[in-house]
Image (cartoon, rainbow, N blue to C red):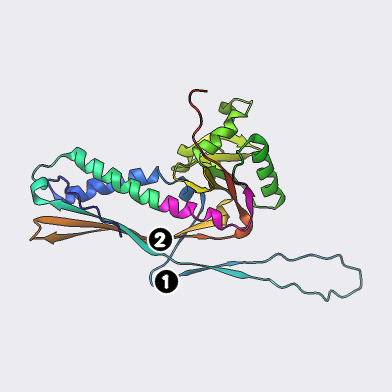
């Protein structure tokens, strides 16, 4: 668990907690687009893991009148098991600074905490992209219109499912927008994605009904400037929670301060490998003076 040992101003510990949590929730909701695109699950009380069954594909056959149907199909069910782990932050609120309460400082701390938790969740989800067995694009390739349409055709041909989406680094998406001829304003966000935090990261680009989202938390991970994005449907990845945000305070008399610890218990996991593919494209900075 990360520890932030910054003294922060406050007049009342209850007020501190409420202010930080309120700001943290607001910030977190607007900084993790990938989490908002994938399927959500919750562990019940006393449960250690969630087992999610998936049935296989069966085949129907032509029948002949008067002839007994002898073949039978196997359900071919598979199980995906999802578990959670704890993530958290710690703040130290000194007595001296608590006497110098400034509400704006509380907002700053809440913003920092929210950004940190949102970034952690989002990067955990992004880490799943490279795990898909289908890998499209390549190191050194630009996310051009031709490559983007080929990616979409592949996803639809492979039956990824309803409402596919694409997420990549803003620089990779910009390369695509450079090659578009139709004004972006003609592409509204489909209703299924029109919710926070997802809608704030919609690029305005839709091709063959597939919306494109940008996420600055995606980092260079291939070659010199390439990064891994994704094309998927919501059922490709999952986000499971066991406990919501928990805040505890503990007095440290010798330090003349109060510790505030924030924790959550969650996990990100691949739900269905057949519903997603990684996208490797260049994400280097574009020239601003050419």
Q: Which residue is mark 2?
A: 266
**Dot 2: few (<14), some (14–19), or many (≥20) neighbours within 10 Å?**
many
In terms of image quadrants, where is residue 208?
top right
Picture quadrant of residue 53: bottom right
Q: Secondary structure at mark 2?
A: strand
Q: Is residue 176 above or below residue 92?
A: above
Q: Nearer the viewer, mark 2 or mark 1?
A: 2
> Where residue 97 appears, x then y in whole percent?
11, 46
Identified at 51% across, 31% down, the residue is: 286
> Counting other residues with Cα less than 10 Å from the Cα at mark 1, is it few (<14), some (14-19), or many (20 or more)?
few
Seen at 81% across and 74% down, the residue is 71
- The N terminus lies in which quarter of the figure? bottom left
Which sits in the foreground, 149 or 15? 149
Q: CA distance from mark 2 to mark 1?
A: 13 Å
Write the start and end of the magenta stretch as one range: 121-139
- x, y (%) of residue 224? 52, 44
Q: Position of residue 77 (x, y in %)?
A: 64, 70
Residue at left offset 31%, top offset 58%: 88
Q: Can you identify the residue that label 1 sits on? A: 47
* Residue 123 counted in the magenta span: yes
Left or right of residue 263: residue 14: left
Which of marks 1 and 2 precedes in the sequence?
1
Q: Is residue 45 left or right of residue 250?
A: right
Q: Which mark is residue 240?
A: none
Residue 174 vertical position relative to residue 271 in the rendered view, above or below:
above
């Amino acid at each position: 668990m990360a520890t932030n040992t910054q003294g922060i101003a406050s007049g009342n510990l209850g007020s501190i907690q409420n202010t930080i949590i309120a700001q943290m929730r607001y910030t977190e909701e607007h900084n993790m687009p990938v989490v908002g695109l994938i399927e959500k699950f919750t562990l019940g009380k006393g449960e250690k893991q969630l087992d999610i069954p998936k049935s296989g594909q069966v085949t129907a056959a032509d029948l002949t009148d008067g002839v007994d149907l002898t073949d039978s199909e196997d359900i071919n069910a598979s199980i995906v098991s999802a578990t959670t782990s704890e993530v958290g932050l710690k703040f130290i609120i000194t007595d001296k600074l608590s006497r110098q309460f400034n509400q704006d400082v509380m907002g700053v701390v809440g913003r920092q905490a929210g950004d940190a938790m949102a970034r952690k969740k989002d990067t955990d989800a992004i880490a799943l992209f490279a795990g898909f067995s289908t890998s499209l694009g390549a190191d050194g390739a630009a996310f051009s219109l031709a490559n983007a349409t080929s990616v979409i055709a592949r996803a639809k041909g492979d039956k990824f499912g309803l409402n596919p989406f694409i997420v990549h680094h803003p620089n990779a998406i910009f390369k695509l927008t450079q090659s578009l001829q139709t004004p972006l304003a003609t592409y509204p966000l489909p209703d299924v994605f029109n919710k926070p935090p997802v809608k704030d990261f919609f690029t305005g680009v839709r091709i063959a009904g597939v919306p494109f989202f940008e996420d600055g938390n995606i980092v260079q991970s291939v070659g010199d400037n390439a990064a891994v994005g994704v094309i998927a449907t919501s059922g490709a990845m999952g986000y499971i929670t066991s406990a919501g945000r928990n805040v505890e305070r503990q007095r440290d008399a010798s330090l003349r301060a109060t510790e505030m610890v924030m924790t959550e218990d969650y996990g990100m996991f691949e739900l269905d490998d057949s519903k997603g593919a990684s996208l490797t494209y260049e994400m280097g900075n574009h020239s601003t003076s050419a």
